[in-house]
Image (cartoon, grey):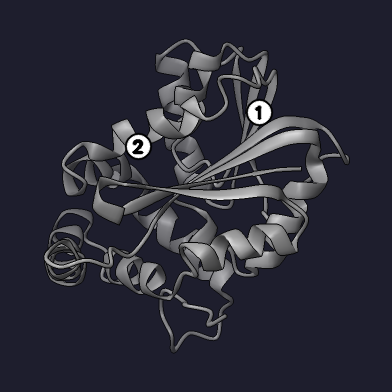
Amino acid sequence: MTTIKPIQSSEKSKKQQVEEMFDSISGRYDFLNHFLSLGIDKGWRKKAISKLISSKPQIILDMATGTADLAVAALTLNPQKVIGIDLSEGMLSMGRKKITEKHLSDKIELLKGDSEKINFEDNYFDACTVGFGVRNFENLEQGLSEIYRVLKPGAKLVVLEFSKPKKFPVKNLYNFYFNTILPLWGRFISKDNTAYTYLPESVKHFPDGINFTNKLTQVGFKEAEQQPLTFGICSIYTGVK
């Protein structure tokens, strides 16, 4: 799989660049997320979390947690604890501020960490969520394998990620918005020249659909499935250890 870096000419690894990029936009990230998705992202997160209702997980890992929106949404499942992990200290700082303001510090813990080396023992978590983060993994297979390792047998992984619509006219409108409007507004509001150019490029090269469910199967997950949302703009992927 092609590795898409925020700045292709940089000698830094994708991991380092992603960390620095999200540090730089962390203060405007939540606003941009909701603004550029027209608020639809909130509904996507609710649908993703609903995939875990039947399993009633008590200890949940939210990988690539960012500002902890999905971790907060996971509290509707009434777990004992949600542990969010992310590379970007800037994003984690915004997430911790949000959690403190919502008085959720007893339920959610945010830690700096790497998807390719999760600092927890085997078979620790009852479920794992990843919201718009797997395409930022430097090594997708290694990240998925690590998630598999720390999940208990029978635990479910739920991945929420952008996908590529296939049908006219949604495909054409989506490509225009993603490649023209979103980078323009993203640069204007965030003052970052790379983040919202990297976003459409990373989505373009991400192995969505059956290619991603195949990745889940390859690292050991069973019952790997995709549920497209909003005309295929986004998808929920699930797999069971």
What mark, if any, has residue 140 been given in the picture?
none
Give the amino acid at mark 2. Trp
Classify mark 1: helix, strand or loop: strand
Going by the image, does 184 lie left or right of 118? left
- Residue 42, quarter of picture: top left
Question: Residue 155: where, in percent of width, then height?
Answer: 73, 33
Q: Residue at x 56, y 16 (%)?
A: 105
- The answer to whether residue 62 is seen in the rendering is no
What mark, if any, has residue 60 been given in the picture?
1
Question: Residue 57: where, in percent of width, then height?
Answer: 67, 21
Q: Residue at x 66, y 57 (%)?
A: 216
**Residue farthest to the bottom, as pictured:** 9
Mark 2 = which residue? 44
Q: Is residue 154 above or below residue 178?
A: above
- Residue 190, quarter of picture: bottom left
| Crowd tier of the residue under label 1, counting other residues whose Cα lies within 10 Å: few below 14, some 14–19, many 20 or above | many
Q: Nearer the viewer, mark 2 or mark 1?
A: 2
Q: Quadrant of the C terminus?
A: top right
Between residues 82 and 219, which one lies in front from this camera angle? Answer: 219
Question: Residue 210: where, in percent of width, then height?
Answer: 52, 64
For the residues labelled 2 and 1, the Cα–Cα distance comes to: 18 Å
Classify mark 2: helix, strand or loop: helix
Asked if labels 1 and 2 touch by Cβ distance under 8 angstroms, the answer is no
Question: Residue 5: where, in percent of width, then height?
Answer: 47, 77
Q: Residue at x 82, y 32 (%)?
A: 124
Between residues 234 and 19, which one lies in front from this camera angle? Answer: 234
Q: Earlier in the sequence, mark 2 or mark 1?
A: 2
- The answer to whether residue 21 is seen in the rendering is yes
Going by the image, does 185 lie left or right of 86? left
Give the amino acid at mark 1. Ile
